Amino acid sequence: MKKVFIVAVLALGLNSFAQDRKERPSREKMEQMTPEQRNQLLVKKMTLDLDLNAKQQEQVGEIIAEQSAKREAMKTERKAKMEAAKAERLEMKNKMLDNQIEMKNKMKSILSADQFAKWESQREKNREKMGERMENWREKRKSEKRE
C-alpha cells in the first residue's frame, strides 16, 4: 500500500513536470470539474502511464480521493482564516481611528487654536518620521531575505 502511494505521488509530480503546457487542461477547466471528475481523470492518466490493474486503480482512486478531500478542507480553512483576519484588521483600524478622533477632539477642547495647530504639525512630523523608519525597516528586511 505504501509503495502504491509513493508511486502515485511520484507519478503525479513527474507527470506535471513532464507534460507540455498545451496538453495539460487549464486551471479553469480543472476547477470547473467536480472533485470526483478530477480524481477519475487522474486515475485514468495514471492507469495509462503506469499500466495499473483494476485493484490498483481502485486503491489509487481511494488515495487520490482522500488527498483531494484533505486539500479541499485545507483550502476552505485557509479561506475562512483569511476572511477572519480581514475582519479583525478592519475592526482594529476602526478602533484606532475612533481613538484618534477622540484624542483630537479632547486636545481641541483643551488647547488654543495656535497650540492646536502646532500640536497637529508636530503629529504630522512624527508620522513622517515613523513612515521613514518603516520604509527603512522594510528595505532592510527585503535585503536580508535576498541574502
Image: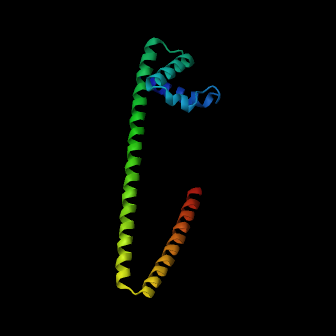
Image quarter of the N terminus: top left
Q: Is 111 rendered above or below residue 63?
A: below
Question: Which residue is at a point 40% across and 48% down the rendered structure image?
Answer: 83
Depth order, front residue of 113/107: 113
Total marks placed: 0
Q: Quadrant of the C terminus?
A: bottom right
> What is the quadrant of residue 51 in the picture?
top right
Q: Name the one closer to the observer, 22 or 43.
A: 22
Place residue 69 in its image quadrant: top left
Q: Position of residue 59 (x, y in %)?
A: 42, 19
Give percent across and percent down for residue 88: 37, 55
Q: Which residue is at 39% across, 76% downward?
A: 104
Residue 16's place in the image compared with 84, above or below, is above
Q: Quadrant of residue 35?
A: top left
Identify the residue at image location x=41%, y=52%: 86
Which residue is at the far top? 54
